[in-house]
Image: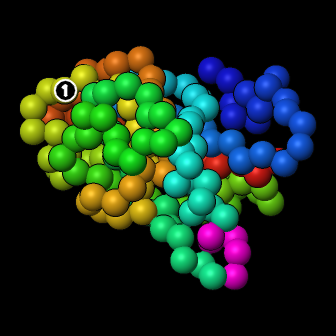
């Protein structure tokens, strides 16, 4: 599986751009990692860009990215405000700088938190500024994976500024 830096190196771009990437892994207590999307590029919504600009500007009025959500729907459009098929519980982000041009966030959807109440096929991920409700800031879809109630999901979400 390629690293994020390898993925970016083979997908160069000109000019200053904000790019987002995510990785979702399903962990089973007995079998370890049973699902892995690999690094996938995401869609940053119009409101996501607006909030990035607000956070970088002097007003600091934008929504801070604080939670990830999983769902069973497809990829969001750039004007999307919700995540299709969102599961019941969002996971709080832990954010850290990943070099001078990236922000890397991680979150765990723990089976003990009952983020799914029955086995579901999860196929999309989204970043929000609140633990419930709010507006979708970025997200994308991936190959559907079955997630049971006794499994946890680890997610890594990275935004690069290059």
Residue 13 lies in magenta, yes or no? no
Q: In percent of the image, x 30 and y 62: which residue is there?
A: 131
In the picture shown, does residue 120 fall above or below 52? Answer: above
Residues shaded magenta: 54-58
Is residue 156 positioned above or below 64 on the image? above
Identity of the residue furthest to the top in this view: 143
Q: Report which residue position mark 1 lands on.
A: 120
Task: Using the image as rendered, state which of residue 130 and residue 157 is in the foreground.
Answer: 130
Q: Majority secondary structure of the magenta segment?
A: helix
Indicate left or right for 106 with 54 as reference. left
Q: Could you say which quadrant of the image residue 147 lies in?
A: top left
Q: Is residue 128 above or below residue 3?
A: below
> Residue 124's spot in the image, x, y percent?
38, 31
Q: Quadrant of residue 25?
A: top left
Q: Residue furthest left?
A: 118
Q: Is residue 56 magenta?
A: yes
Could you say which quadrant of the image residue 66 lies in?
A: bottom left
Which percent across, then down, holds residue 155?
44, 42
Q: Along the line of sight, which residue is nearer the eye, 91 or 1?
A: 91
Image coords of residue 161 (percent x, y): 76, 51
Residue 46 seen from this side: yes
What is the tally of numbered marks visible in this picture? Answer: 1
Q: Nearer the viewer, residue 24 or 112?
A: 24
**Residue at 67% across / 64% down in the picture?**
53
Q: Residues within 10 Å of mark 1 (few under 14, many from 20)?
A: some
Asked if one can make out residue 33 in the rendered structure from this viewpoint, the answer is: no
Q: Is residue 7 above or below residue 139?
A: above
Residue found at x 62% / y 20%: 1
Q: Residue furthest bottom?
A: 59
SS assignment at label 1: strand
Measured from the top left, where is residue 128 in percent x and y?
41, 55
Seen at 19% across and 26% down, the residue is 120
């Amino acid at each position: 599986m390629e690293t994020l830096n390898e993925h970016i190196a083979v997908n160069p771009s000109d000019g200053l751009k904000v790019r987002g990437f995510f990785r979702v892994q399903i962990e089973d207590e007995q079998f370890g990692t049973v699902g892995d999307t690999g690094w996938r590029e995401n869609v940053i919504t119009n409101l996501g860009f607006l909030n990035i600009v607000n956070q970088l500007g002097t007003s600091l009025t934008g929504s801070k990215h604080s939670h990830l959500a999983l769902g069973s729907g497809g990829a969001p459009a750039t004007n999307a405000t919700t995540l299709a098929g969102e599961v019941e519980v969002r996971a709080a982000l832990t954010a850290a700088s990943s070099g001078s041009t990236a922000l890397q966030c991680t979150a765990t959807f723990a089976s003990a938190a009952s983020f799914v109440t029955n086995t579901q096929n999860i196929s999309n991920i989204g970043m929000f500024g609140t633990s419930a409700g709010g507006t979708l800031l970025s997200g994308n879809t991936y190959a559907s994976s079955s997630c049971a109630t006794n499994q946890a999901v680890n997610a890594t979400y990275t935004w690069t500024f290059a």
